[in-house]
Image (cartoon, helix red, strand yellow):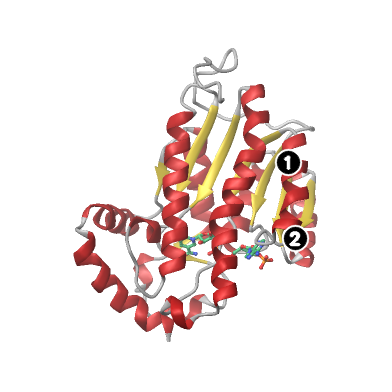
């Protein structure tokens, strides 16, 4: 049972601000080896947090770790883990449950395009495991500790794609519907607990992922925002316990339209666009 009627730590307004960085506590970032995750890790280190960097590519995490330590003087631990693999994830979750985790950024995620029946079904299962089940697992791992310390921040990277049905992107859209809903529901449960929960639900964010070349050519340039801007906005929002952050004016507008337009109308329109990406 979560204790949610607690006024929070003395000297801090309930639900506002984050635990200050200490030599003991850590900010955890999943998907830290590229894109938004690297930017989140950099933003947290810049604010003085020592970090735990998680992704599969340990070499990239090691480079980032060195850079963050050199630049900001923080400790940066590396965990090379495939989060879609339950056997690899379990010891990581146990470790996080036993540590002083000030901030958890559940950010790792991948997308697939095309009719789900034509895609690799094992990979589709792995996408669900990574984008949804791992987010649930790691959040549940850190929650008891955050509740007992009466402080913490949980950032969940969902997506504008989670706001609506998207044919030809079905697994991704559904997995992000989970993250969007889980984040905003959890935030409601934790009101007054001292734990902030913010959903990052971006539209297009420019990263160095080569997969973006295909999408990039079909999405107008003015809609894109940078990963660094997204990361700064996200940690600012988490600090203020904002429910949802959507970087970029155009994406904000599209997010509202996606949430409130009739789904029977949006599904075929959006599906036709994603069909071009699925090729
Ligand atoms: N960029 C956008 O336009 C956009 C828009 C909306 C939402 N998002 C969401 O933002 C998050 C970050 O996306 P991004 O654009 O920054 O993508 P990215 O550059 O491709 O980064 C994805 C990260 O997830 C990690 N990852 C992938 N599979 C993993 C696995 N099985 N186990 C552990 N880590 C894994 C990758 O590291 P390894 O390959 O080293 O494991 C990488 O660090 C995702 O959740 C994505 O859905 C992005």
In the drawing, what numbered circle is on residue 61? 2
Specify whether residue 50 is in view.
no
How far apart marks 1 and 2 lie (CA) works out to: 18 Å
Q: Ligand 1 sits in which quadrant?
A: bottom right
Residue 83 x %, y %: 67, 58
Query: Which is closer to the viewer, label 1 or label 2?
Result: 1
In this image, 137 relative to 163: left or right?
right
Seen in the picture, residue 226 relative to 256 is either above or below; the reply is below
Seen in the picture, residue 71 relative to 167 is either above or below; the reply is above
Number of other residues with Cα within 10 Å of mark 2, as a class: few under 14, some 14 to 19, many 20 or more: many
In this image, 107 relative to 216: left or right?
right
Residue 40 x %, y %: 60, 51
Residue 259 x %, y %: 28, 53
Residue 132 x %, y %: 54, 55
Report which residue position mark 1 lands on. Answer: 96
- Residue at image location 53% in from the left, 51% down from the top: 231
Instruction: State which quarter of the image contains the C terminus.
Output: bottom left
Seen in the picture, residue 49 relative to 78 is either above or below; the reply is above
- Residue at image location 55% in from the left, 24% down from the top: 194
Does the numbered disc 2 mark a residue whose Cβ is under 8 Å from ligand 1?
A: yes
Number of other residues with Cα within 10 Å of mark 1, as a class: few under 14, some 14 to 19, many 20 or more: many
- Residue at image location 60% in from the left, 31% down from the top: 152
Specify whether residue 29 is in view.
yes
In this view, the residue farthest toward the bottom is 279
- Between 152 and 88, the one lying in front of the other is 88
Instruction: State which quarter of the image contains the N terminus.
Output: top right
Does the numbered disc 1 mark a residue whose Cβ is under 8 Å from ligand 1?
A: no
Asked where in the image residue 25 lies, by quadrant, the reply is top right
In this image, 92 relative to 13: left or right?
right
SS for dot 1: helix
Asked where in the image residue 159 lies, by quadrant, the reply is bottom left
Q: Return the disc, 1 or 2, that comes first in the chain's sequence.
A: 2
């Amino acid at each position: 049972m979560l204790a949610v009627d607690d006024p929070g730590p003395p000297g801090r307004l309930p639900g506002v601000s984050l635990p200050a960085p200490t030599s003991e506590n850590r900010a955890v970032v999943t998907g830290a080896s590229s894109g938004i995750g690297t930017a989140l890790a950099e933003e947290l280190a810049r604010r003085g947090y020592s970090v735990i960097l998680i992704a599969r590519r340990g070499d990239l995490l090691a480079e980032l770790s060195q850079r963050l330590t050199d630049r900001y003087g923080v400790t940066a631990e590396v965990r090379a883990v495939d989060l879609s693999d339950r056997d690899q994830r379990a010891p990581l979750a146990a470790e996080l449950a036993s540590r002083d985790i000030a901030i958890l950024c559940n950010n790792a995620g991948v997308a697939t395009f095309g009719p789900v029946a034509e895609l690799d079904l094992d990979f589709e299962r792995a996408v669900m495991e990574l984008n949804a089940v791992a987010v649930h697992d790691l959040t549940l791992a850190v929650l008891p500790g955050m509740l007992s310390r009466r402080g913490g921040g949980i950032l969940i990277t969902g997506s504008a794609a989670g706001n609506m049905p998207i044919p030809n992107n079905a697994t991704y859209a559904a997995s992000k519907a989970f993250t969007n809903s889980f984040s905003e529901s959890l935030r409601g449960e934790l009101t007054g607990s001292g734990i902030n929960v913010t959903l990052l639900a971006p539209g297009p964010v420019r990263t160095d992922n080569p997969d973006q070349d295909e999408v990039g050519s079909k999405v107008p340039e003015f809609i894109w925002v940078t990963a660094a801007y997204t990361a700064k906005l996200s940690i600012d929002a988490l600090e203020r316990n904002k429910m949802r952050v959507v970087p970029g004016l155009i994406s904000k507008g599209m997010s509202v339209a996606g949430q409130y337009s009739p789904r029977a109308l949006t599904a075929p329109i959006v599906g036709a666009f994603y069909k071009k990406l699925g090729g």
